Image: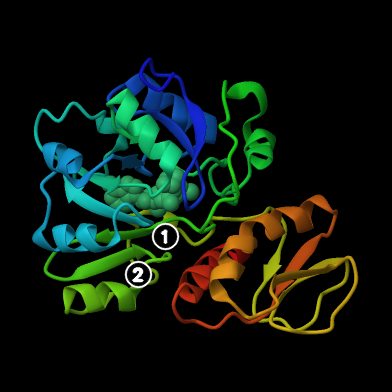
């Protein structure tokens, strides 16, 4: 299906991807249409190896260091595309750069190897909505508009990959499970976090994005009227409006639960969602980044 240009949903270790053959503009167009995604928001392309990325993009020396350490894994490299790469120009940003990722997911990797094509795959959700971690949520987003959703065991990470860009400095365009500290330790140089309110290079940076469709309030200790409360840490709170991100105060566990709980709270009919303060370190930075955008 991938080879022939059909768009399908495939899980990765981060979130579900809405996947299509990156060599076929017809498939890439279909992805944009299905998601109602603005054309200026480029797509991540998935590869089976660094060697495969080297064939189509100019790989920065720091990218090689990072790939050796973190790929396959939840990290995406924005690189200049080579001429005659065969990749659909629709996936590129305005500077003709391509975002490349090697997913750490057995089935996805096996599909990449067997189809022998790079796979464009943004998160499998409508543009601006919350990403999906379960086949059932992908189905709620797209219904019969897509021909196949590959069901899978529970997704491991739950937040989209870290997106980074190379230049005179290394810049994080979108924080994720591979943190600034991890990048700095491997590269032995400073890495900068997303610049707030600057011009948008990765529309994942747009202020209102990742929205569950009802108001979200950050750093709250109590719920609001008709609202749900997402709790972080060991509390004795009870009631159908209480949802635990992590009782043991694990940021990794909270990351994995965040999108599912935002969706569940809305589906249960709550009209707003308050969220406990989340420590702003490690993957907590990525959680706060998504929550800040969810709050708009
Ligand atoms: O974990 C992930 O990255 C998931 C899974 C499916 O791999 N994919 C994902 O894709 O989150 P998407 O399209 O929802 O988010 C891609 C982010 C967006 O913020 C987009 O603007 C940015 O990466 N991006 C994609 N291509 C880019 C490029 N060429 N230059 C700069 N940013 C780019
Ligand atoms: Mg997305």
Q: Position of residue 3 (x, y in %)?
A: 35, 19
Kindly identify which numbered label has been placed on residue 194. 2
Residue that mark 1 sits on: 205
Tell which of 67 and 58 is nearer to you.
Answer: 67
Is ligand 1 less than 8 Å from the beta carbon at label 2?
no
Q: Is residue 24 left or right of residue 126?
A: left
Q: Quadrant of residue 26?
A: top left
Residue at horizontal 85%, vertical 80%?
237
Image coords of residue 54 (percent x, y): 13, 43
Kindly indicate the quadrant of the structure image that contains residue 177.
bottom left
Do the residues bearing badges 2 and 1 touch, measured as CB atoms within 8 Å? Answer: yes
Q: Judging from the image, what secondary structure is the residue with disc 2 in?
A: loop
**Which colouring convention does the figure follow?**
rainbow
Vertical comparison of 209 with 91: above or below: below
Residue 184, visible in the rendered structure: yes
Rendered residue at 60%/23% (across/down): 145
Which class describes the residues within 10 Å of circle 2: few (<14), some (14-19), or many (20+)? some
């Amino acid at each position: 299906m991938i080879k022939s240009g059909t768009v399908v949903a495939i899980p990765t270790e981060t979130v579900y991807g809405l996947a299509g053959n990156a060599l076929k503009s017809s498939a890439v167009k279909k992805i944009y249409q299905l998601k109602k995604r603005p054309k200026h928001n480029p797509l991540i392309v998935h590869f089976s190896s660094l060697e495969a990325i080297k064939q189509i993009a100019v790989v920065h020396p720091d990218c090689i260091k990072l790939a050796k350490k973190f790929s396959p894994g939840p990290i995406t490299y924005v690189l200049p595309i080579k001429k005659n790469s065969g990749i659909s120009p629709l996936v590129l940003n305005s500077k003709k750069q391509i975002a490349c990722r090697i997913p750490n997911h057995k089935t996805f990797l096996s599909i990449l190897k067997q189809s022998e094509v790079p796979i464009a795959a943004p998160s499998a959700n409508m543009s601006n909505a919350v990403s999906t971690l379960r086949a059932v949520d992908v189905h709620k987003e797209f219904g019969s508009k897509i021909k196949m959703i590959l069901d899978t065991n529970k997704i491991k990470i739950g937040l989209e990959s870290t997106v980074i860009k190379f230049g005179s400095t290394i810049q994080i365009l979108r924080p994720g499970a591979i943190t600034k500290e991890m990048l700095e330790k491997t590269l032995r140089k400073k890495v900068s976090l997303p610049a707030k309110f600057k011009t948008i290079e990765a529309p994942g940076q747009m202020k209102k994005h990742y929205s569950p469709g009802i108001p979200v309030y950050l750093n709250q200790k109590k719920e609001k009227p008709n609202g749900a409360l997402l709790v972080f840490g060991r509390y004795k709170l009870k009631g159908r409006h209480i949802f635990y991100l992590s009782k043991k105060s694990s940021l990794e566990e909270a990351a994995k639960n965040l999108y599912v709980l935002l969706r569940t709270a809305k589906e249960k009919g709550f009209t707003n969602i308050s969220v406990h303060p989340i420590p702003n370190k490690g993957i907590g930075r990525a959680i706060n980044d998504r929550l800040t955008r969810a709050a708009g």
